[in-house]
């Protein structure tokens, strides 16, 4: 019916590339497919319930928890993971700001936050503090207390506006 | 050196050097233990007791072993070496044999071709239990029939300080306040759950990649239970997703190695969140009854306290936790006489052990509530009362130990108290959807809100205590100009990897410093806990760097690291120094809890402002201010990260975090119902003062900073809610019903 | 792990045809409830019918007097689209759900089908006397919300049916949704109140969430309050009305004790929320005659 076959598998478009998924049981979440079938271990699993945001990805431009997405149902969708931002050796401006502002400690929440912040700033380039908090409320962090994360978001905003980079 | 030269130098000690793993972490390329894979890898899963207490009648693994794709099903019969493990006492079975003593205790482990098959195999293991009534009351446990061969009292510690006479009539003329305070069970909730990968080795040993806080103590326990010589068990640190005490005890380490050796294949295990909640220890819940006596001018005369901590089923680090709780039970104040009666007991509740703050969090909640009650009874300002009694260098703490290092307690208090109050017209903080309690829930209007502000102060020891000969090991090697530092210090997010680079750069004048993997091929670095790694592993790296510097200086004829001769010798020689770094010795506490048991102390204060919707019991954090005594800032940005992160954990314990246990069973083992603060629940932390008085004996004079922020933060937030509501609130976390239906004091 | 089939119908017709063959099928929309169960191993479906590709379910329409919201409309859509202007109560409720990630995926149909006692849109729908359209191969039938939700996590949905849409009147007066949670995001309602005023029909409706096995309409309080408010001027003359209304609504609650909170707290909080909601809906206080 839709190119999703329990034996032959199915194809997903991930980070602009067509990737074939085989050997996956069809009830598998997108998070597990990304990590265990496609070698994209950037998205993290920390709760399996959509309560922490560590697995955040973009599906057709919408920010979602990949642990709550049925992988087989994303055939035909455009999936973007943290690996799509920046390149090896060159960080995206959001990634760079996280490093510069001390927003990374253990780093487990970081990939999910990078995706969320990219999504936020594409929608709203100059969010006020309340908007930042509301947009990031689905991303738990246990190490940082969030202060440096908010600072990183503000830094990106400032830098994209072309203002002089403010050293944190 | 010219200014231009200085400008291009990689950041050294004192600078906000960026962490070397930050880029990979931000790109999702950093390998956490849960990301590791190996060819031919199997997946492991654990069979756990659903009961808080039961006799094991039988364990039938037939059905599990018969499932296609299952490679091993192991029980207690399959543990070749020591059947038990444990941090201080080896009192916990690797796999339960005759009895289970807590809900979640491991009974068997399986390995299968994939995670789903492993889970189904675990479900297919048939364990027959005979239920026993669980012992769940910590107070009752003191005299109840033992639930473990080692007895129910893990430690009873009494501190008798000064000359405290029971029912002393001279106290009658003094002002006295008393209260009983309760702290609920908090969980460390690191985002990374337990994870590891074990590979059997050709020499009959095993290689384990694991997220942990102390590689060598894990190695020793694995070796003991596997019946292997320690050098056959090799641990390497896999990327760690936070710890906060949850990884001090073995969780899956021994299980994974057993499975790897039994199957002859690599085996990986990752706990899901629910399993993680029952798979590691928690912060000890505590019931603490206090009485303070003071003179009319506010001078504290005596503090009596009885502390009962519920250690749950196995000992973990409970003996050390109660010592901390007791030693710091009265807070950072001069107390001439004290009787502190500290108990940590065994129950069939979930096992408790290390969590950031380690006993001092609990007693700080109590002693700060007492100080506020005392201030009120004396008619004194609460800040003035604290300043009046604040410890100074040269004073004794409750154990009789004289503070010989720095103790800027008054400055910590004063700077925090004197910070300007929050200005509501400042739109940056708390406007919009979260301006009021209830947030997007729109429960509250401005007129429903009462505001309260309060301050709390706390302290604890740095490093291990009571005569433990703690040390760390580091190696600095230079070959062909490549500088490598090796240290087994577990990086759990705190930023030791950054600091190690900064120290080597500072000492040797180099820029590029490579970090070797943290593993057991080098000597122990000790535990990433007790706020000790900067002092101990930083100290080891410093000592190794200085040893290399001395060697180079000998060869170069100068110890000026910028001199061309030095630079050339560094670049063209081969230098390799290994140092084991110890701190000054401490001693055990005597029968009266007296003795120089601690190395150093760190002090912190928080001032919290909250808006409370009194009718609904909802709290909004308006402002948080802190001052902390740090000795010396080695990396200001990383320091700030510790202050902010620790403070928010304290906020969590004040307002929302509690493992709910009923009849020994955990009711909320998920992030749906164990709530940690989101970004929408906190305000900015304003740092009033970072107080730098270099600590004698500490490398660079720097004190560890990780735990101090968690200690007074909870107390300050709850005290602010008391100020807003007039309620006694002797319990934390504070629930909406405690406020909405509470009785006014 | 067994074999699982996944179907991705593109139309309601295709979907209902799949459901008509009698084989058990698990409906999947946003996944925010179902996937939690699958991830935990509690649910092991054999046949999944994924509804996310059915465009007609992801749209809403209005004829000016009613809004028909497709079951696949997400919380995010209910916040941002013009539907928020047509039903502010639903927008308020949607904003309290989960997180941005959850709001982008979760749907109103899912909220209905799961029928959790704490579902956030449900009290608003109950207050509005919403009807639910259920599609099968035999056509579409309409049931009232109270007939649809039959118990905690229980609905009248038949095995061969899917939820097509939910229909509510366009707002014709103030709407309030108030939700108590222990933290500001990703929190299940401890209790909630929806209050809607229909100025045209001259009615006030109050529904309670997480205060009973199903959403509860506080009908005694609703009837009483009509004679104590002035709809035309949005005013309340007697200040005791608010207090009394709150108590009457609290009396209608049937809360339980659970690990999130006590029945006593829930009942108390319901009363407070109801009082405040009424005060907001009727903000004017005519001056007392000298």
Image: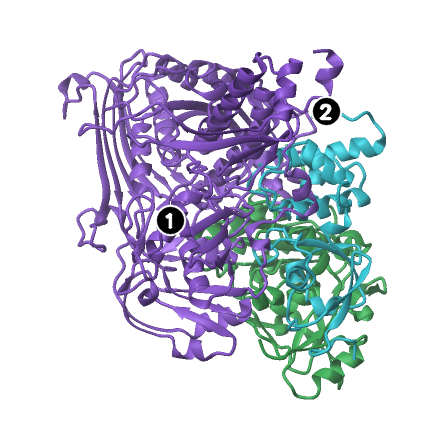
Q: Position of residue A153 (x, y in %)?
A: 72, 36
Per the image, the residue denoted by label 1 is B230
- Residue at 29%, 34% (x, y): give it: B323
- Checking the image for residue A167, the label placed there is 2
Q: Is residue B114 visible?
A: yes
Is A22 drawn above or below residue C287 in the view shown?
below
Q: Which chain is green?
A: C
Observer-side mark, 2 or 1, equals 1
Q: Position of residue B705 (x, y in %)?
A: 49, 28
Is C264 drawn above or below residue B5 in the view shown?
below
Q: Colour of chain B?
A: purple
Q: Is residue B110 visible?
A: no
Residue B362 left/right relative to B269: left
Secondary structure category for the residue under label 2: loop
Q: Which chain is cyan?
A: A
Mark 2 and mark 1: span between their CA atoms? 48 Å
Secondary structure category for the residue under label 1: helix
Residue B10 left/right relative to B214: right
Is B125 drawn above or below residue B5 in the view shown?
below
Rendered-image quadrant of the N terminus of chain B: top right
């Amino acid at each position: 019916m839709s190119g999703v076959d329990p034996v032959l598998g199915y194809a997903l478009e991930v980070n602009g590339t067509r990737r074939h998924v085989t050997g996956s049981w069809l009830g598998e979440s997108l998070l597990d497919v990304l990590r265990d079938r496609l070698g994209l271990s950037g998205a993290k699993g920390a709760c399996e319930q959509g309560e922490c945001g560590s697995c955040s990805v973009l599906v057709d431009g919408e920010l979602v928890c990949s642990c709550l997405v049925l992988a087989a149902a994303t055939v035909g969708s455009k999936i973007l993971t943290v690996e799509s931002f920046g390149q090896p050796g060159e960080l995206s401006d959001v990634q760079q700001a996280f490093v510069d502002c001390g927003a990374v400690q253990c780093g487990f929440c970081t990939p999910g936050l990078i995706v969320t912040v990219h999504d936020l700033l594409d929608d709203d380039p100059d969010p006020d503090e309340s908007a930042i908090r509301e947009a990031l409320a689905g991303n738990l962090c246990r190490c940082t207390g969030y202060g440096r994360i908010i600072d990183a978001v503000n830094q990106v905003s400032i830098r994209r506006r072309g203002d002089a980079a403010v050293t944190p | 050196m010219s200014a231009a030269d200085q400008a291009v130098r990689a950041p050294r000690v004192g600078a906000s050097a960026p962490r070397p793993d930050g880029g990979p972490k931000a790109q999702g390329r950093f390998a956490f233990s849960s990301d590791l894979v190996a060819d031919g890898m199997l997946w492991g899963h654990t069979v756990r007791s659903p009961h808080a207490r039961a006799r094991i009648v039988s364990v039938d693994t037939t059905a599990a072993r018969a499932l296609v794709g299952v490679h091993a099903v192991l029980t207690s019969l399959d543990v070749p070496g020591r059947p038990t493990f444990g941090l201080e006492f080896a009192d916990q079975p690797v796999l339960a044999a005759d009895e289970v003593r807590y809900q979640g205790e491991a009974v068997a482990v399986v390995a299968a071709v994939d995670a789903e098959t492993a889970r189904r195999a675990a479900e297919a293991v048939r364990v027959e239990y005979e239920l026993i009534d669980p012992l769940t009351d910590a107070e009752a446990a003191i005299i109840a029939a033992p639930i473990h061969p080692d007895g129910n009292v893990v430690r009873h510690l009494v501190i008798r300080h000064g000359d405290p006479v029971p029912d002393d009539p001279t106290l009658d003329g003094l002002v006295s306040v008393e209260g009983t305070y309760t702290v609920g069970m908090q969980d460390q909730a690191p985002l990374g759950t337990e994870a590891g990968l074990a590979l059997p080795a050709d020499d009959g040993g095993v290689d384990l990649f694991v997220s942990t806080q102390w590689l060598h103590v894990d190695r020793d326990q694995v070796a003991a239970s596997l019946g292997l010589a320690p050098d056959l068990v090799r641990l390497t640190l896999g990327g760690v997703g936070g710890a906060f005490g949850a990884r001090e005890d073995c969780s899956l380490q021994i299980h994974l190695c057993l499975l790897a050796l039994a199957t002859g294949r690599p085996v990986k295990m990752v706990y899901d969140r629910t399993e993680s909640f029952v798979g590691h220890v928690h912060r000890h819940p505590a019931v603490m009854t206090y009485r303070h006596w003071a003179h009319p001018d506010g001078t504290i005369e005596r503090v009596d306290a009885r502390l009962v901590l519920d250690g749950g089923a196995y000992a973990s680090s409970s003996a050390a936790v109660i010592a901390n709780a007791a030693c710091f039970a009265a807070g950072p104040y001069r107390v001439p006489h004290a009787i502190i009666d500290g108990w940590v007991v065994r129950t069939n509740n979930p096992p408790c052990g290390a969590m950031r703050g380690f006993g001092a969090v609990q007693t700080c909640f109590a002693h700060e509530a007492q100080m506020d009650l005392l201030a009120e009874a004396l008619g004194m300002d609460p800040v003035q009362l604290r300043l009046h009694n604040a410890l100074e260098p040269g004073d004794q703490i409750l154990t009789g130990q004289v503070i010989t290092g720095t103790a800027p307690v008054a400055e910590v208090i004063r700077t925090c108290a004197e910070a300007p109050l929050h200005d509501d017209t400042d739109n940056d903080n708390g406007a919009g959807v979260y301006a009021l309690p209830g947030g997007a829930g729109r429960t509250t209007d401005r007129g429903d809100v009462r505001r309260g502000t309060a301050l709390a102060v706390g302290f604890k020891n740095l490093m291990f205590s009571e005569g433990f000969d703690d040390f760390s090991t580091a190696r600095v090697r230079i070959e062909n100009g490549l500088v490598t530092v090796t240290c087994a210090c577990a990086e759990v997010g705190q930023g030791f990897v950054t600091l190690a680079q900064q120290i080597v750069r500072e000492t040797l004048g180099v820029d590029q410093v490579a970090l070797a993997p943290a593993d057991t091929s080098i000597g122990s670095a000790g535990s990433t806990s007790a706020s000790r790694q900067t002092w101990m592993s930083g100290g080891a790296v410093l000592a190794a760097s200085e040893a290399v510097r001395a060697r180079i200086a000998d060869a170069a004829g100068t110890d000026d690291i910028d001199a061309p001769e030095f630079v050339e010798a560094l670049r063209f020689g081969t230098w390799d120094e290994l140092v084991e770094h110890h701190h000054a010795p401490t001693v055990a506490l005597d029968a009266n809890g007296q003795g120089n048991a601690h190395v150093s102390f760190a002090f912190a204060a928080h001032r919290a402002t909250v808006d409370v919707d009194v009718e609904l019991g909802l709290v909004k954090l308006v402002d948080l201010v802190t001052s902390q005594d740090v000795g010396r800032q080695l990396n200001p940005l990383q320091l700030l990260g510790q202050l902010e992160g620790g403070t928010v954990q304290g906020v969590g314990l004040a307002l929302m975090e509690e493992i709910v246990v009923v009849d020994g069973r955990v009711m909320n083992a998920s992030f749906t119902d164990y709530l940690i603060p989101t970004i929408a629940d906190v305000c900015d932390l304003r740092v009033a003062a970072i107080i730098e008085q270099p600590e004698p004996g500490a490398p660079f004079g720097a004190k560890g900073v990780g735990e101090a922020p968690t200690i007074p933060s909870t107390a300050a937030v709850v005290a602010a809610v008391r100020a807003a509501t007039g309620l006694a609130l002797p319990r934390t976390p504070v629930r909406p019903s405690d406020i909405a239906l509470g009785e006014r004091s | 792990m067994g074999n699982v089939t996944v179907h991705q119908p593109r139309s309601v017709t295709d979907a209902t045809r799949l459901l008509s063959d009698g084989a058990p099928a698990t409906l999947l929309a946003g996944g925010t409830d179902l996937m939690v169960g699958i991830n935990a191993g509690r649910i092991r479906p054999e046949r999944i019918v994924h509804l996310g590709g059915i465009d007609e379910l992801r749209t809403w329409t209005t004829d000016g007097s009613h809004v028909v919201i497709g079951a696949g409309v997400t919380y995010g859509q209910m916040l941002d689209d013009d539907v928020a202007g047509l039903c502010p109560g639903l927008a308020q409720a949607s904003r309290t759900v989960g997180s941005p990630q959850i709001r982008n995926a979760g749907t109103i149909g899912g909220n209905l089908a799961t029928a959790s006692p704490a579902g956030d849109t449900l009290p608003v729908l109950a207050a509005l006397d919403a009807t639910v359209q259920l599609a099968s191969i035999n056509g579409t039938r309409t049931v009232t919300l109270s007939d649809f939700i039959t118990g905690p996590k229980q609905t009248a949905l038949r095995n061969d049916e899917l939820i097509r849409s939910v229909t509510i009147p366009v707002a014709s007066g103030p709407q309030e949704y108030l939700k108590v949670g222990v933290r500001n995001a990703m929190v299940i309602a401890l209790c909630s109140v929806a209050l809607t005023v229909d100025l045209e029909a001259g009615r006030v409706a109050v529904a309670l969430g997480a205060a009973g096995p199903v959403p509860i309409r506080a009908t005694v309080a609703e009837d009483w309050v009509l004679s104590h408010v002035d709809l035309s001027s949005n005013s309340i003359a007697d200040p005791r009305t608010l207090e009394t209304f709150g108590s009457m609504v609290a009396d209608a609650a049937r809360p339980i004790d659970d690990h999130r909170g006590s029945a006593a707290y829930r009942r108390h909080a319901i009363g407070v929320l109801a009082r405040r909601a009424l005060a907001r809906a009727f903000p004017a206080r005519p001056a007392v005659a000298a």
